[in-house]
Amino acid sequence: MTVSTRGEQTYESRGGGLALYRTVRLIRRFEERAVELVRSGDIVGGIHPYLGQEGVAAGVCANLGPDDIVTGTHRGHGHVLAKGADPARMMAELCGRATGLNRGRGGSMHAADFGVGVFGANAIVGAAGSIATGAAWARRRLGVDTVAVNFFGDGAVNEGMLLEAFNLAALWRVPVVFVCENNGWATTMRVSDAVAGSITARAEAFGIPSATVDGQDPEAVRAAARVAVDRARAGDGPSFLECHTERFDAHHTFEHRARLGYRSAEELERARSRDPVDIQGARLARLDRERIEHEVETLLADAVAFALESPYPDPVGALDDLYASGLRPRQGSGV
């Protein structure tokens, strides 16, 4: 990492043009390859694709260090990758293989990598806000200069768990950044049909500084997140970012068969007209862009091969790690 004489990270090392493009391109191609593996049956049960929202994860995580914390959602692959998790082990996790980030036990909606500060994707809507707030508070109590970021969707802003996290974070000045990925839909329900008032007003009611940003522009997200992260690290408490973004694909790959039809072809075309990968790629020289794209293709080809060549977990160990103490359920207990 390049460091200036003042000890500050340079623009490029903090997620400048090349680094941002590599991240959004990596997430995009990872998701596309994952969808292919869903269709081939190698990923069982499907995934919630992050296609179209790559600029949010890339822009926010460009401001985080290795000791910072991220919690995400059921649509969490982008958060995990942007924070620095190994794409090969992430792909293996989606395929349910023993070499996965969580030995094939977490799958798509619960991937975690404590080694890079990913405290987990979370399938419970709004729940990860409490985890991020508690983890950031605990680290700060230990004197560790840690910032936590919690990603969640627009559907989470009506959940009590998240609002409780806002309250505690504001009350105790916890170094946490709340990032709402507002893609306009809570599964198949429009935001306008589910959310009274404004999303940012939820956080502002607790005295949390809030901002709305173009989530399709990785540079805009990076700049807004830098202000929030620096504020948290300085001890000034939480911030809230509402990132307006677009979900290019289905809520879940199940829709590829179900054809629910809640979005028209025209609406999908409008959503795809501002692609974060294209927006960031247009800022690069052609040779730099092509070099990064080649590197990403090679990386993901290796990741898919690694995942498919890896063994499945041994059923004998199915009950391992259920308890921190190592205690195992009694035989015949029905557990």
Image: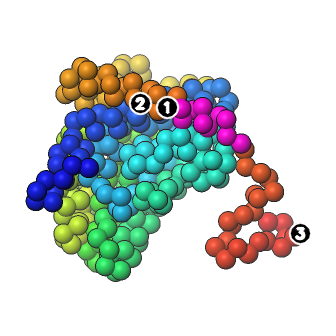
Any mark on residue 300, and which? 1
Q: Name the residue nearer the viewer: 128 or 110.
A: 110
Q: Give the range drawn in magenta.
A: 302-311
- Determine the CA span between mark 3 and mark 2: 49 Å
Q: Where is residue 140 in the image (x, y as percent from the top left)?
A: 32, 76
Q: What element carries label 2?
A: helix
Q: Name the residue under label 3.
A: 332
Query: Could you tell me if the residues under marks 1 and 2 are in contact, i.e. CB atoms within 8 Å?
Result: yes
**Magenta stretch: residue 308 in it?**
yes
Q: Is disc 2 surrounded by few (<14), some (14 to 19) or many (20+) residues within 10 Å? A: many
Q: Who's the residue at 76% across and 59% down the image?
A: 317
Question: Is 109 left, or right, of 164 in this rendering?
Answer: right
Q: Where is residue 160 in the image (x, y as percent from the top left)?
A: 43, 65
Q: Who's the residue at 67% across and 77% down the image?
A: 325
Sequence-earlier tag: 3 or 2: 2
Any mark on residue 296, and which? 2
| Amino acid type of the residue that numbered disc 3 sits on in the rendered structure | Gly
